[in-house]
Image (cartoon, helix red, strand yellow):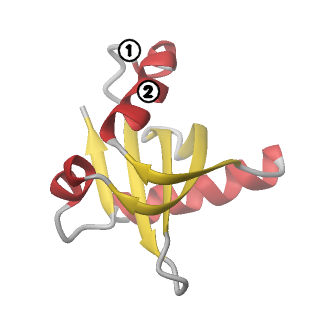
Amino acid sequence: MALLEAILVGLGTFIVAVGTLDLIRIVTLWLGDVTDWFRARFHLIGQNLDHIAFGIREAQRNGRVSYVQGVFDDQRGNVLASRRWDAESLGTDLRRIHGPNELAVYR
């Protein structure tokens, strides 16, 4: 199974278990917003190579961008923590990191 598919399955399980994702509405989402959240969850990522910090972007019909970031346990196939951003746009740094891809992996 591709990494994006595995994360999406794990994210679905996480939402069912927790009930929802934190949602933050913002005008422009910058890389600093994303990395600050990952830094606060270093205890989940640390040196464990099975724990993957990820970001998934999705263009919405209304022109906004939905961005889900989280920590995925590749060995167990589950999401350990996540949150969702709703933004008018992504900053240039995030657009560059993602390029044409929906998924970005942060190492």
Taking the image as shown, residue 18 lies to the left or right of residue 59, namely right
Query: In the rendered structure, which amino acid carries the disc numbered 2?
Result: Phe
Depth check: give the residue in front, 70 or 23.
23
The residue that mark 2 highlights is: 38
Q: Is residue 51 something one can see in this rendering?
A: no
Above or below for 21 versus 107: below
Taking the image as shown, residue 27 lies to the left or right of residue 89, namely right
> Where residue 103 appears, x then y in whole percent?
32, 59
Secondary structure at badge 1 equals loop
Depth check: give the residue in front, 18 or 65.
65
Q: Is residue 40 something one can see in this rendering?
A: yes
Q: Residue at x 20, y 47 (%)?
A: 93
> Where residue 66 appears, x then y in whole percent?
51, 64
Q: Nearer the viewer, mark 1 or mark 2?
A: 2
Q: Which of marks 2 and 1 precedes in the sequence?
A: 2
Quadrant in which the C terminus is drawn: top left
The residue that mark 1 highlights is: 46
For the residues labelled 1 and 2, the Cα–Cα distance comes to 10 Å
- Which residue is the extreme one toward the front? 27
> Where residue 105 appears, x then y in whole percent?
28, 45
Query: In the rendered structure, which amino acid carries the disc numbered 1?
Result: Gly
